[in-house]
Image (cartoon, rainbow, N blue to C red):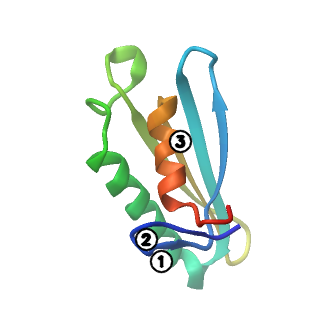
Amino acid sequence: MAFEGEGGLNLHYLIFDASDDGEGTGTWEAMASVRAAQLPAVLAEVKALLAWAEAHAPGPRGPLDEGGAWDADEQVQTEAGDWTTVTLTLTGPWDWGEALVAHFAGPGD
């Protein structure tokens, strides 16, 4: 599913999956598996998501169990052949993460 955010960025590659802990904290995992030619576009999407997260941060970034309000983890793994899997995991307050997803969601998504 492609998302077009208010800023005009289309998320053509990253697909979100969300979960919450029942206590107001959520985890949003965005993943894409692409060929090498699409990797720069996926990394641009990750960069845009992280920029939004930083700009709208609910507090300091860091592990939640060490006092951080939110955190992010980016993984880039080269697979067999020409494929690369990119995973971005964001953790933080549920409302903040849902606002991030809504910001990048198109009107019909």
Label ID, residue 50: none
* Mark closer to the chain start, 3 or 1: 1
The x and y percentages for residue 92 are 45, 30
Image quarter of the N terminus: bottom right
Q: Outermost residue toward the front?
A: 107
Q: Residues within 10 Å of mark 2 (few under 14, many from 20)?
A: few
The x and y percentages for residue 26 are 56, 30
| Residue at position x 43%, y 71% in the image | 44
The x and y percentages for residue 89 are 54, 43
Q: Quadrant of residue 57?
A: top left
From the image, tell me which residue sits under label 2: 44
Q: Are marks 1 and 2 in contact (CB under 8 Å)?
A: yes
Image quarter of the C terminus: bottom right
Q: Tag count in the figure?
A: 3
Q: Amino acid at mark 1?
A: Pro
Q: Nearer the viewer, residue 54 or 73?
A: 54
Q: Are marks 2 and 3 in contact (CB under 8 Å)?
A: no
**Disc 2 versus disc 3: distance between alpha carbons?**
20 Å
From the image, tell me which residue sits under label 3: 98
| Residue at position x 61%, y 73% in the image | 12
Badge 3 marks a residue whose secondary structure is helix
**Disc 1 versus disc 2: distance between alpha carbons?**
6 Å
Q: Is residue 41 above or below residue 106?
A: below
Badge 2 marks a residue whose secondary structure is helix
Q: Is residue 63 above or below residue 91?
A: above
Q: Residues within 10 Å of mark 3 (few under 14, many from 20)?
A: some
Badge 1 marks a residue whose secondary structure is helix
